[in-house]
Image (spheres, rainbow, N blue to C red):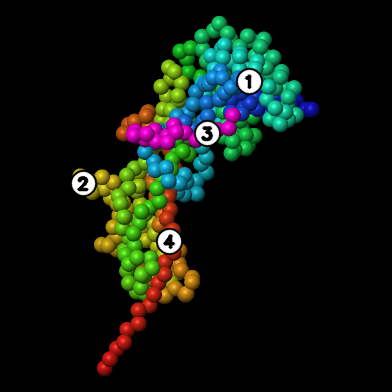
Amino acid sequence: MSSEGRRTAIATATVLAATALSILVPQQAGASGGPDGDRGEVEQKPDVSPGGGAVGAGAGVRISTNAPEAGKPMAPARDVAWEPPACWYKPMWKPKEYKEALESSSPPGAVLGDYADEFYAYKEKRKKQKYNVGKKGTWWALFHDGDRDLKAAGCLDLEPDLWVPEGEKPDDPHALNPKILAMIAYKKTRLPAPPVKLSPATDRQVVNLDTHVSFKAPLDRVWVTASIDYPGMDVAATTVATPASLKVDAGTADADPRTCTYDLTKADGKDGYRVDSKSADCNITYKRATAKGAPHTFTASLVWDVTWTDSADPDGAPVGEPALPDGQSTYEQPVTVKEVQSIVRD
């Protein structure tokens, strides 16, 4: 095996080692939301002891949010090259916990594949270091997003764990920090579909009659806080998605105009953001009746301005960098257009 190939093999094995030690147990969804919007944990706190004890429980990334459970995951509103982090370090073990976790771990062959030798060599390396038992500090473990390509994301070039002395911050950009937590929070954001109402209704559209768009209920901003759930560590970030503009598409070229865009407004003294197109300059007008059994698909796309704070406070001062892309939520509805026949008498 070439030196480069062996380096990749060892890196793969060490990442797999951290995986085997920390997230071999399937991840579970967090608890349902409480009165303050708590949604529980993003990750299953790992259980690495043979008997299923609490050894090496480590940190979780905890999510709190006011987002509706029925919402859909927020997607970037534009074609931007943005992805949340593929891997990160988080506080995991005290030295004695690490010793017990590593010594008791025996990942199945299906996990390690051809890298078993490297994995056990890694265990031996930490054994010779005595796992830093007797020193004050925490081992941070490398976790990863199971949906991502670890090699392409550069995760295979990272050590599987970091030793962080007590009172110090990890000197690694991949260690959980407000920036990474903000991106995790972005990925965990769920947005409601635009609660649009058409007048006339979708099954009562008439040729050459303006279609007015309004909200059935005002929308509030959606916030998500991601924080480190580990004793003595107060690190958090909150993303805030504010409804900004609504674009509607008639679903056919036989409309004038085919699309309209409206800004959302928040009335003084009232909660939530809304749109009512009745007095707007742009209103969709269907120019031709639909064929039987072939309705148009009316689409409403709501763009959300996304900002983030480096705290658990949605009302905290926004952080400028890195900027997060706008979010988007959509609503689709079949529309049937009729043509009203009139009789003209002399």
Dot 4 or dot 3: first in sequence order is: 3
Dot 2 or dot 4: first in sequence order is: 2
Label 2 environment density (alpha carbons within 10 Å; few <14, some 14–19, many ≥20): few
In the rendered structure, which amino acid carries the disc numbered 4?
Answer: Gln
Expressed as whole percent of the image width and height from the top left, the position of residue 234 reads 41, 22
Dot 3 or dot 1: first in sequence order is: 3
Write the residue at 25% across / 62% down: 279
Which quadrant is home to the N terminus? top right
Dot 1 corresponds to which residue? 50
Q: Is residue 313 left or right of residue 19?
A: left
Dot 1 or dot 2: first in sequence order is: 1
Dot 2 corresponds to which residue? 268
Q: CA distance from mark 4 to mark 3?
A: 34 Å
Q: Circle 1 sits in a helix, a strand or a loop, which is it?
A: loop
**Mark number displayed over residue 333:** 4
Write the residue at 61% across / 32% down: 154
Q: Is 162 inside the magenta-drawn segment?
A: no
Dot 3 corresponds to which residue? 28
Closest to the observer, 71 or 115: 71
Q: Main secondary structure of the magenta part?
A: loop
Q: Is 32 inside the magenta-drawn segment?
A: yes
Which span is picked out in magenta?
A: 25-40
